[in-house]
Amino acid sequence: MKIQALPQSIINPALKVRDDIKSDFVLKALILANDGTGPLTITKLTYGLVALNQLVKEIVYPGDALTERLEDGYQQIVSNDPWILKSMLGSSIRWRPEVMSKTRVLQPGQEAVLLNEYFIAVAAQPIDAVEIRVQYQQNGIEASERLVLPVTDYHTRNAYTFPLKGVWQVSGNYDFYFGHRTHYALEFSIDMEKLNNDGMLKWKDAMANEDFVSYGQQVFAIGDGEVVDCFNDAHWRILFHDDFADKEKRRMLKQMEEQVGRMPLQYGNYVVLKHAHGEYSVYAHMIEGSVAVQKGNHVRQGDVLGRVGNVGFSTGPHLHFHLMDGPDVYSARGLPCHFTNLMDCRRNPLSLIQQEYTLVMAKP
């Protein structure tokens, strides 16, 4: 048997919780391949969470539970279009639905996959390794394979300032498991909506864009960089689940994608900046015509890039932002982004946003 993991090293933005450390991280994909000459049956999968060579927590998938996870992985691979798969899982693995199994039995050359395994552990030390052990039967023999993945924290290589001014509510954070975090490049993405003077997020049905406090707010470069991609002509707004569920709308969206590309379709008007040390920042859903830069421009920290809008895959006016390790949002890896000028609602310094619906204020 051959085991392959994505990613091969895991980012764990450890959080101090009183006297302990909370580790919260995800293994995007685990691929189990039968590279032998006879069929094999996977009998058990075990994840061991380790800190300083000590086992902190163990997660075990025996027969039926493992079958359920493998079937779920199979369905996600065979039912999603290539863009969604690339966004969810990057481009380092070539997915081959034709050789995938949805059961614990793998014929020679077949593969099975588990997707988005989330881990949480609270201990005196942060988790620094995941030990993966797969037990199986093949040709009448009990056997096992083992893989150890390093788990590390990540600190941004540059000093960044928040891309907005004033008080904002942050959502879609990495501790919300069913949004951005299911995607490889978007794992540490955040969406930001501005609060009004009463500290409220005003929302009602059929509100005009201009009635939202967020709409039209200036978006700033988090650091010095080069514009490696941008778009400024998007006027469309797409409700992803509703519009893609309609066959005729899906056909129209496919035509739009062929004309403008997937990135503008999804992110509307956006800017991608290349910073020093291999980090890239993304700013999305901005107002049509508001993007103030062009590809190839060099910007300084604090330069205006555009204005908060409501285009692309957007449910309301907000800024989508994330940091990644490459220029392509469909293949790069998402990274946590630390800021130098943030405060929480108690005016305490805040570097990394680690909780859903955190209220933040950017210092001048």
Image (spheres, rainbow, N blue to C red):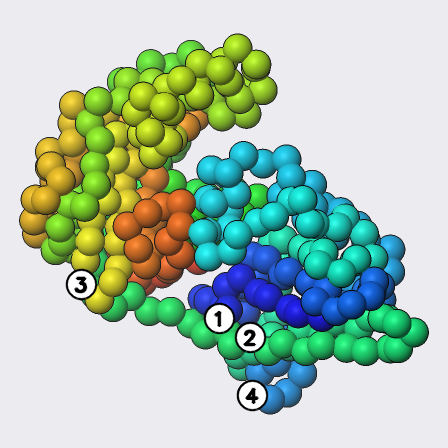
Asked whether 97 or 278 is in front, the reply is: 97
**Residue 221 horizontal/vertical position (percent):** 17, 47
Quick one: label 4 or label 3, which is nearer the N terminus?
4
Query: 227 above or below 342?
Result: above
Secondary structure at badge 3 equals helix
Given the image, on which type of amino acid does mark 3 rest? Ala
Mark 2 to mark 1 CA distance (whole Å)? 6 Å
Q: Residue 49: image x %, image y %?
A: 64, 75
At horizontal 83% and vertical 57% (from top left) the residue drawn is: 105
Q: CA separation, marks 4 and 3?
A: 32 Å
Q: Which residue is mark 1?
A: 9
Q: Separation of disc 4 and disc 2 at Cα?
A: 14 Å
> Label 3, on which residue?
276
Q: Earlier in the sequence, mark 4 or mark 2?
A: 4
Q: Secondary structure at mark 1?
A: loop
What residue appears at the point 23 percent right and 44 percent down from the top-left corner? Answer: 272
Q: Do the residues bearing badges 2 and 1 touch, measured as CB atoms within 8 Å?
A: yes
Q: Say which label, 2 or 1, has the lower sequence index.
A: 1
39 left or right of 304? right
Q: Return the disc, 3 or 1, that comes first in the chain's sequence.
A: 1
| Mark 4 element type | loop
Give me the C-alpha separation between circle 3 and circle 1. 22 Å
Numbered circle sitting on residue 149: 2
Amino acid carrying mark 4 in the image: Leu
* Foreground label between 4 and 2: 2
Q: Residues within 10 Å of mark 3 (few under 14, many from 20)?
A: few
Say whether marks 4 and 2 touch (CB < 8 Å): no
Image quadrant in which the N terminus is located: bottom right
> Depth-wise, is mark 4 or mark 1 nearer the camera?
1
Q: Toward which corner of the image does residue 282 lie, by quadrant?
A: top left
Looking at the image, tell me whether mark 3 or mark 2 is earlier in sequence order.
2
Q: Which mark is residue 52?
A: 4
